């Protein structure tokens, strides 16, 4: 009864005109990965785990930071402002920091699901009750950026 709900087709409501250059690159990277199978410890291109998916999307968009675990991402990046929580590109953390995804908007997020691969999922009851919090990766202005600690 507590199984992950079936993914829906993305209903990504943010007009790309409102996204910056880096965010548009991220969206392209996400779209290229949709449907790619899950495999623990991988970062693509044929399989992804959740942190590998997140890392690879940012790498393709030119935002450089070290590939690491979900818990390290949580520690490395600063919490977003209230207005940024459901902004495209914010990281959303679940299940006691054992899962991470990329916020699409207030309706859903992208992630590498263990059972379904890279998918869009809605912030429904299943996911909302599992959220631990959010973090923002600093986006470079005109180049790549090595993330500094948000602690």
Image: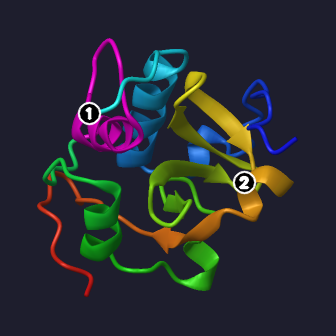
| Residue occupying image coordinates x 25% and y 87% | 151
Please, is residue 2 above or below residue 5 in the view?
below
| Residue occupying image coordinates x 34% and y 45% | 51
In the picture as drawn, the residue positioned furthest to the front comes out as: 1
Quick check: can you spot residue 124? no
Closer to the camera in the image, 39 or 33: 39
The quadrant holding residue 70 is bottom left
Residue 127's tag is 2
Mark 2 vs 1: CB contact within 8 A: no
Q: Which is more N-terminal, label 1 or label 2?
A: 1
The quadrant holding residue 3 is top right
Q: Where does the magenta region start and end?
A: 42-61
Measured as percent of width and height from the top left, residue 130 is found at: 67, 62
CA gap between label 2 and label 1 equals 22 Å
- Dot 2 falls on a residue whose secondary structure is helix
Q: Circle 1 sits on which residue?
A: 41
- Dot 1 falls on a residue whose secondary structure is loop
Measured as percent of width and height from the top left, residue 94 is found at: 56, 60
Q: 24 left or right of 18?
A: left
Please, is residue 140 above or below residue 8 in the view?
below
Closer to the camera in the image, 78 or 25: 78
């Amino acid at each position: 009864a507590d199984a992950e709900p079936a993914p829906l087709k993305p209903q990504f409501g943010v007009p790309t005109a409102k996204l910056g250059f880096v965010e548009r690159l991220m969206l392209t990277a996400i779209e290229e990965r949709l449907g790619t199978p899950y495999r623990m410890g991988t970062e693509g291109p044929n399989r992804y785990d959740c942190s590998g998916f997140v890392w690879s999307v940012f790498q393709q968009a030119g935002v450089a930071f070290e590939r690491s675990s979900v818990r390290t991402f949580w520690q490395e990046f600063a919490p977003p402002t209230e207005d940024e929580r459901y902004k495209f590109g914010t990281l959303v953390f679940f299940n006691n920091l054992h899962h991470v995804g990329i916020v699409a908007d207030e309706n859903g997020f992208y992630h590498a699901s263990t059972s379904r691969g890279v998918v869009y999922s809605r912030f429904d009851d299943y996911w909302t009750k599992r959220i631990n919090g959010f973090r923002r990766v600093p986006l470079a202005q005109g180049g790549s950026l090595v993330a500094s600690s948000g602690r």
